[in-house]
Image (cartoon, helix red, strand yellow):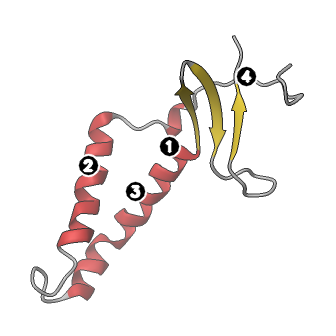
Amino acid sequence: MGSQGVATVVEGVPERRLTRDELLDIYGRCHGWLHEFNPYVNPDPQAFVSINWSKLVTDRDRVQQFIERHFIAINGRGYFCVLWDSVDNQTKCLPLNK
């Protein structure tokens, strides 16, 4: 039992994982939104949106699931972090012990 009175087992969730190549692909598509969604590159912004919107939403959801629960280490000490707690929507960090 941890110092916060919580016992937990942290396990990976395969469907939330992103490979390096998937992250690079998502980054590339986000780059398009940052640098191509303007009248100098795309004279018809609505066409860009209609072509790319659903993939942007999918990418956003996948990245959010990927980072929602994660492990961090600070000075050799591990923490399990939840960015949006399901009860109060707050960020939580739980210190881990071996």
Among the 4 quarters of the image, the one containing residue 77: top right
Which residue position is annotated with label 4?
A: 9
Q: Which residue is mark 3?
A: 59
Residue 27 placement, left or right of 82: left
Query: What is the spatial separation of the Cα atoms under label 1 and label 3, in whole angstroms?
Result: 10 Å
**Towards the viewer: 92 or 9:** 92
Task: Name the amino acid type tagged 2.
Answer: Asp
Label 2 crowd bin: few (<14), some (14–19), many (20+), radius 10 Å: few
Disc 4, SS: loop
Element class at badge 2: helix
Q: Position of residue 5 (x, y in %)?
A: 89, 28
Please name the residue that numbered disc 1 is placed on: 66
**Is the residue 72 above or below the residue 35 in the image?**
above
Tags 4 and 2 touching, CB below 8 Å: no
Disc 4 from disc 1: Cα separation: 18 Å
Residue at the image position 10 percent from the left and 79 percent from the top: 41
Tell me which numbered mark, 4 or 1, is placed earlier along the sequence. Answer: 4
Residue drawn at x 64%, y 38% as measured from the top left: 81
Which of the two labelled residues, at mark 1 and mark 3, occupies the earlier sequence position?
A: 3
In screen coordinates, is 5 left or right of 40? Answer: right
